Amino acid sequence: MSRLDSFIRRLEAQRRMLDWAAASIMDRPGLVLELGLGNGRTYDHLREILPERDIHVFERDVSPNPASMPPAGMLVAGDMAMTLPAFAARHGRSAALVHVDVTTGVPERDRILFAWLPEHVAALAAPDALVLSGWELDHAALVAVPLPEGVPAGRYYAYRRVC
């Protein structure tokens, strides 16, 4: 499969996952966290499908498309290894949905570079929160759940926060 076809499949899976997650948390209180802004495409989609939700976005190097810039107070700029614990100290486990959209595009590299991230995600996710990620998150409090129909195994990952 070409890298272009792989990219298209990843985006299709990502959209399906976000739509599924939005429907799943519709009646649940809590924040929505977007870890990684990049160009802002997934943030833009989240704010469209969850218009009544506060969506906090975390990004080290902020440079989205101007149409996808989060409003003041919703963007947390800086190294997530520092900004996530500070946010957790203020908000606790208050997220109904956490979307982990930070990646180098190389799963083996991601597991090493972001080994610290699952602990921070678990510290932010409310009980029974959904956590979505483009790569596997290994943490005892994050239990894998079945993916929605049409998302191939290994393309995206979904977890529930237990206890």
Image (tube, rainbow, N blue to C red):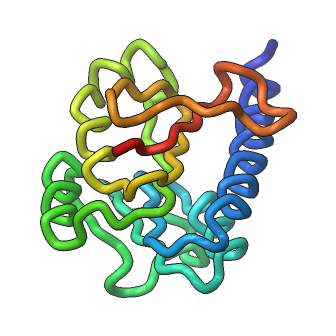
**For residue 47, side relative to residue 76 (left or right):** right
Q: Is residue 95 above or below residue 146?
A: below
Query: How many numbered badges does the structure rendering display?
Result: 0
Quarter of the view holding residue 19: bottom right
| Residue at image location 32% in from the left, 84% down from the top | 73
Image location of residue 55, percent across then percent down: 47, 73
Image location of residue 141, percent across then percent down: 34, 35
**For residue 22, side relative to residue 39 (left or right):** right
Q: Is residue 159 above or below residue 104?
A: below
**For residue 129, side relative to residue 58 (left or right):** right
Give the farthest residue toward the right: 150
Quarter of the view holding residue 22: bottom right
| Residue at image location 50% in from the left, 75% down from the top | 29
Which quadrant of the rendered structure holds the C terminus? top left
Between 137 and 105, the residue placed more toward the observer is 137
Image location of residue 8, percent across then percent down: 79, 35
Image location of residue 110, percent across then percent down: 38, 24
